[in-house]
Amino acid sequence: MVTMVIGIMMTMGVSMLRSNMERVAGEVTHSRLLNIKAAMIHHLRQSDRLPCADGITDTVFDGREDLLSGVCVDKVGVLPFLELGLNRQDVMDGWNNFLPIMLAPQALIRQLTGPVAR
C-alpha cells in the first residue's frame, strides 16, 4: 500500500515537473522571438530589406545569409543570427530547435526590384 502511494506521488511530481519545464521553454521561446523581432526591424531599417535565410544548400548553418549576386539562394532555412547581431542560441526555441525563416513572395519581389517608392 505504501509503495503504491509513493508511486502515485512520484507520478504526480514527474507530471508537474514536465508541465513546469514546458512552461519555461515556452517563456524562453517567447522572449527570444521578441529579441528576434527587434533584430529583424533593425536589419530592415539598416538594409532596407529583410535578411535571407541561412539555408540548407551550404549544409551548415553558419549564421550568414545565403546570397548569390544579391539574390537569396534559399527561400527557407534558419535565421541568419550573425547578420542579425545575435548568437546561435538566440535563434533557437526553448526546446533547442532552430527557429525557421521563410521568405514571402513579396519580400523576394522587393529584393529583386529594390525598395518601394514612398
Image (tube, rainbow, N blue to C red):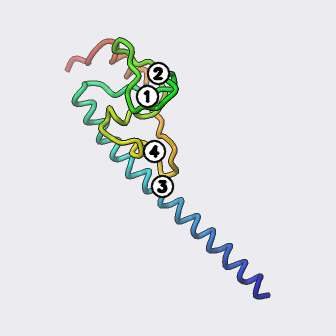
Evaluate if marks 1 and 2 touch, with contact meaning CB atoms under 8 Å apart: yes
Residue on which disc 1 sits: 54
Give the foreground label among 1 and 3.
1
Give the class, few, some or many, for how many residues have Cα within 10 Å of label 1's Cα (few <14, many ≥20): many
**Kind of element beneath mark 2:** loop
Q: Is residue 5 left or right of residue 110?
A: right
Q: Amino acid at mark 1?
A: Asp
Q: CA distance from mark 4 to mark 3?
A: 12 Å
Question: Is residue 38 placed above or below 3 in the rendered structure?
Answer: above
User: Tag 3 or tag 1, which sits nearer the N-term?
Assistant: 3
Residue at (32, 32) in percent of width and height: 83
Q: Give the labeled residue for mark 2.
A: 74
Amino acid, disc 4: Met
Between marks 4 and 2, how big is the CA–CA gap? Answer: 19 Å
Q: Is residue 99 positioned above or below 17 on the image?
A: above
Q: Are marks 4 and 3 in contact (CB under 8 Å)?
A: no
| Residue in view at x 43 percent, y 20 percent | 105
* Mark 1 and mark 3 residues within 8 Å of each other at the beta carbon: no
In the rendered image, residue 10, in percent from the top left (x then y), is placed at 67, 76
Q: Quadrant of residue 47?
A: top left
| Residue on which the image places disc 4 | 92
Disc number at residue 26?
A: 3
Label 1, secondary structure: give it: strand
Secondary structure category for the residue under label 4: loop
Q: Nearer the viewer, mark 4 or mark 3?
A: 4
Q: CA distance from mark 1 to mark 2?
A: 7 Å
Residue in the picture at 44% in, 18% down = 73
The residue shown at (35%, 11%) is 69
Q: Earlier in the sequence, mark 4 or mark 3?
A: 3
